[in-house]
Amino acid sequence: MSHSAQNLHFVAQPSSRAVGDIIVPGDKSVSHRSIMFGALAQGTTHISGFLPGQDCLATMNAFKTMGIEIEGPDSHNNVTVHGKGLYGLTAPKETLNVGNSGTSIRLLSGILAGQKFSSTMLGDSSLNKRPMRRVVDPLKQMNANIQASDAGTPPIVCEGLADNQTLKAIDYHLPMASAQVKSCILLAGMYAKGITKVTEPGITRDHTERMLQAFGYPITVEKNIDDCVEKTRISIEGGHPLTACDIQVPGDISSATFFMVAGLIAKEGELIIRNVGMNPTRIGAINILQQMQGNLTIINERMAGGEPVADIVVKSSALQGIDIKAQDVPLAIDEFPAIFIAAACATGITRLREAEELRVKESDRIQAMADGLTTLGINCTVYDDGIDIIGGQLTSGTVNSFDDHRIAMSFAISALRAQGEVIILDCDNVATSFPSFVSLANQVGLSIIAKA
């Protein structure tokens, strides 16, 4: 499925079973960071289980454009990165186009802020509408010569530091819980003079902190700041080296969630999903689906490449509507479109609040999901920070994914419980995170056809 095959749409038919033993693609967050840290490390980094989706390839291509030699991914999704150290990047001869990848543009902003050369980054039509002041403003506080457009969106232009200029360390309190903003500032902190501190108001993904430690970069993580369980402060001192290492990328829990929900809402069957990343900052979807009486069992727990992984056994379940706990929201922020499908198939009302962040993802995911669910006969009420979904019978119809890969895949699995055909428009971006989605879904018993 190539990104150039514009206006791809999915035609999903009802089916009753989801059965199989599958492996989902590698974790997108870990794949991005493995390329970034491998490029900035001294030595050769070997990555296994890399996700060859367009978002991660955009990160890879950006570093190739800045002079880093990268081999792969091969047929087994192995990648080799020949690092050149923190100061080994060279000026790109062209604008860095990162496609649909918010992770690429925001984390790269922190790296590019510390360079002596100029660079410009932009993305596709969807990414170019997303907010970037959240990273540009703290980087400016660090003395970076960086700016977004007047609307606070891409392109991001970084003029580069003068020869006698360095970034300065800051003590930054995140206004919202955001792993991308936190990571951007920590990456810039590697180039700053002094100790940069980032305090987060709620739990966010800690892949950056884990991988910094895997590459031998010293950081300090203080939990329970001000007697608040969710508050964490991360401190990083500039100027230390990164040392190349081997990275095993676990299966992406966001990708696994589509199959968790499929297995739960199918009328019959059992699915086993192997080698899923179980990072404690990412397991909100499992918590929520188990609270909805979903029969999910975690087995074979182990560590791989500094990240916890496990296998998940999923059985058909009679789901119940719940009030989603606020502490689970940041731990499941990318998985909510799929969780909304589970809610639509549950008995009773599922209520979500404190999820404003969903409105500034690849699409306004609250409104986009509400529109699609309404089309398919499900009653829902939208709020500024959430949604109420009343479980019921999914009908049939045509829904718009708004170029959002997670919306497209969520409505594709909804057909398991629909009365008729579900057509999902604008599915090109599924290739950004899960190129094999349609073939894997059909393998376990769903009926999805991708049409250009």
Image (spheres, grey):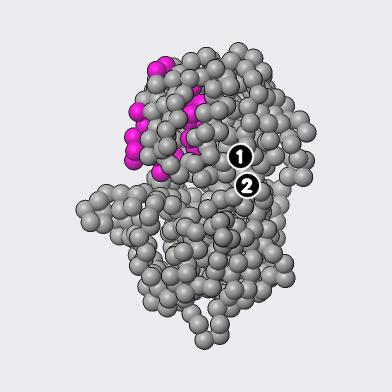
Of pointers 2 and 1, the one earlier in the residue sequence? 2
Task: Check disc 1: other Cα within 10 Å, few if <14, some if 14-19, many if 20+.
Answer: many
- State left or right for residue 396 relative to residue 252: right
Q: Residue at x 45, y 44 (%)?
A: 357
Task: Based on the picture, tell me whether residue 312 belongs to the magenta stretch.
Answer: no
Q: Nearer the viewer, residue 133 or 115?
A: 133
Amino acid type, mark 2: Ser
Q: Residue at x 46, y 18 (%)?
A: 391
Q: Are marks 2 and 1 in contact (CB under 8 Å)?
A: yes
244 is higher (above) or lower (below) than 340: below
Which residue ends up furthest to the front in the rendered image? 150
Residue 156 disc label: none
Marks 2 and 1, Cα distance to the nearest angstrom? Answer: 9 Å
Q: Nearer the viewer, residue 7 or 430?
A: 7
Q: Which residues are magenta?
A: 323-348
Q: Which residue is mark 1?
A: 404
191 is higher (above) or lower (below) than 414: below
Picture quadrant of residue 163: bottom right
34 is higher (above) or lower (below) than 6: below
Q: Position of residue 266 (x, y in %)?
A: 54, 19
Q: Secondary structure at mark 1?
A: loop
Q: Which residue is mark 2?
A: 126
Residue 271 appears in the figure: no
Amino acid type, mark 1: Asp
- State left or right for residue 37 relative to residue 235: right
Q: Residue at x 56, y 56 (%)?
A: 151
Q: Position of residue 423 (x, y in %)?
A: 67, 24
